[in-house]
Structures are given as C-alpha cells and as structure tokens.
Amino acid sequence: METTQYSIPTTQYSLPQIASQVRRDILRMVHGCQSGHPGGSLGCADLLVALYFQQMKINNRKGKGGYLSFNLDGKGEDLFFLSNGHISPVFYSVLSRRGYFDVKEMATFRKLNSRLQGHPTTHEHLPGVRVASGSLGQGLSVAIGAALAKKLNGDKNLVYCLMGDGEQQEGQVWEAVQFAPNNNVDNLVAFVDVNGQQIDGSTNKVNNNRDLGAKYKAFGWRVLTVDGNNIDELVTLLSKIKRLVGKGQPIAVMMKTEMGQGVDFMMHSHKWHGVAPNDAQLEQALAQLPETLGDY
C-alpha cells in the first residue's frame, strides 16, 4: 500500500518521514536533560503521527504567533487523551510538529520553568494538552467523560485514548472499562500499547495481563488488533474505525508495538523504559533515523 503524502505546513512529507523526525526529537529531548522515557515514546510514534497528521479532525485555524488555535473544550474536534503520560516526549514532538507551538521549545523538555514537564500538565497551558496525566490508570475515565460530553452537546466527533499495557494493572482502568459499554459510549476509541514491557521488566513477569483483548470483549467492547509500528496498517484500521463507531459499543484496539522501535539497541527490552542515552548512544541512535523535517 502506497503511503499518502501530507502537508506540514507547506512541504510534502510521508507519515513514515514524519515519524522518523518525531523519533529523533524524542531521543534529543531525553538526552538533553538526561531524563525521561524514550522506550514507549519511540514505540508509539507511529500511532500519534497517524492520528494527528492524517486521521483526527482538529482545529486548523491559526492563532497567536501563527500557531494552531487551541480550546480546552474541543468542540467540533476529535480529542486525544494520553493516559500513560510518561511517554510525554512523543506527545510533545507531535504537537509541536503539527503546529501547536514552536519546535524549538522542545529544547526545554524537563528543565526548570519549562511548559514541557516530564508528565503533561494543564497549569503550564501548553496547547494540545487537555488533561494532566502520568498518574497511571486515570486517562480512560477522563476520555469517557469527554465522550459523554460530546454526546450531550450533539458533537459527532470522536475521542481517542492511549494507555500502556503495564497500566492495565491499575484498578481504575477496569472500572472505566466496565462503565463505557454499560453507558453506550460508542464515540470512544481506546488504544492499549501492548509492548509487553514495563519499568520493572516484562508485563508477563511483573503481573501477567493474560489476554487483554478477551477481557475487554467480555466487558462489552468491540476489540480490534493492529501492528502499531506499521503506519499503513494503522491508517487502514483508523479509517475502518470511523465506520464502526456509533453502533452501541466503545472500541478497544490492542496495538502491538516494540518498545524502543527504530533504534536497534533499545528494542526487545524494558531497559530503555526510563533511561536517557549518553552522547555516544545518541549519535548511534540518530544514525538509524533519517532527519526529515529538520532538527529543532
């Protein structure tokens, strides 16, 4: 399948080209402050790029400084909520590359007085961030609330949420999983990043989730699967989802990814969940990722 070209803002790039730049941004941000979570960020880059640069309906009006206008209520737009907030580097990169704020601001990641905190916050007033996240297990509940608000407002747009598979060990997740089908929250799409890794090791060893898809299905969700590191497959699935919403069931996507995707020595291990690369490792990693949009 040929990958479509998308405009940001005036030059044509493919989604894989954008994702490569996002992965470079992730590595440089985490290296710059020697702190952060590169592993899951690298693994989820393809999804966020597909959402923000191709699938989601967002407000393209320009505001102050020529950046995208942003309203917290999100009326008339699709909404995205990042529940596993520790992968903030990928979120910040995609938001800035999409035009919410200057890409140069990524250089302030995790530094004093920066709007780009280690976990996204709202009191910093960073455009694109609608909820503080990082306290794992809460994002799905917030997304359900936003989806219900859209129904009350007659807003036909969708709400997307991303969670980690280690995060599925949180009890609040399952309260929300039970609530959504029982209340016909069928404008909600929840992605679970199934990379099999969390900070202390593999999810199977720490607290085995067993068959997450079967669990969601048992609670009343429509369950789909996707290779989360194949952008063409993601685009196909996201297009399919738009034909499946509004039919009485929320949709859960079990998204198989590789932690550290794109950097060979960061893959297949939980080691890079929350470790920053040193100078030599950064150089080695960047050599594997073509610079496309230009480094900040």
Image (cartoon, rainbow, N blue to C red):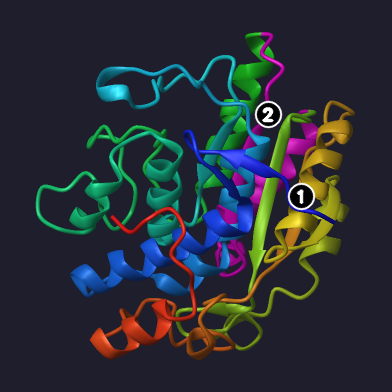
Drawn side of residue 162 relative to residue 118, left or right: right
The spot of residue 169 in percent (x, y) is 59, 67
Q: Residue at x 63, y 74 (%)?
A: 195
Does the magenta run of residues contain 172? yes
Residue occupying the far left of the picture: 112
Helix, strand or loop at label 2? It is loop
Q: Is residue 105 above or below residue 45?
A: above
Q: Kindly indicate the quadrant of the structure image that contains residue 95.
A: top left
Give the total number of marks visible in the rendering: 2
Q: Is residue 129 above or below residue 29?
A: above
The spot of residue 160 in percent (x, y) is 63, 39
Q: Residue at x 79, y 43 (%)?
A: 251
Query: Which range is magenta?
Result: 154-183
Please state which amino acid type lies under the numbered disc 1.
Ala
- Crowd rating for badge 1 (residues with CA inside 10 Å; few <14, some 14–19, many 20+): many
Helix, strand or loop at label 1? It is strand
Q: Residue at x 57, y 70 (%)?
A: 166
Drawn side of residue 106 relative to residue 134, left or right: left
Q: Kindly indicate the quadrant of the structure image that contains residue 220.
A: top right
Does the magenta run of residues contain 206? no
Image quarter of the N terminus? bottom right
The spot of residue 96 in percent (x, y) is 37, 43
Asked if disc 1 and disc 2 are in contact, CB closer than 8 Å, the reply is: no
Looking at the picture, tell me which residue is in the foreground, 182 or 295: 295
Image quarter of the C terminus? bottom left
Drawn side of residue 158 relative to residue 202, left or right: right
Reading the image, the residue beneath label 1 is 252
Q: For residue 281, say whether it is visible.
A: yes
The spot of residue 84 in percent (x, y) is 48, 57
Reading the image, the residue beneath label 2 is 158
Q: Kindly indicate the quadrant of the structure image that contains residue 63.
A: top left
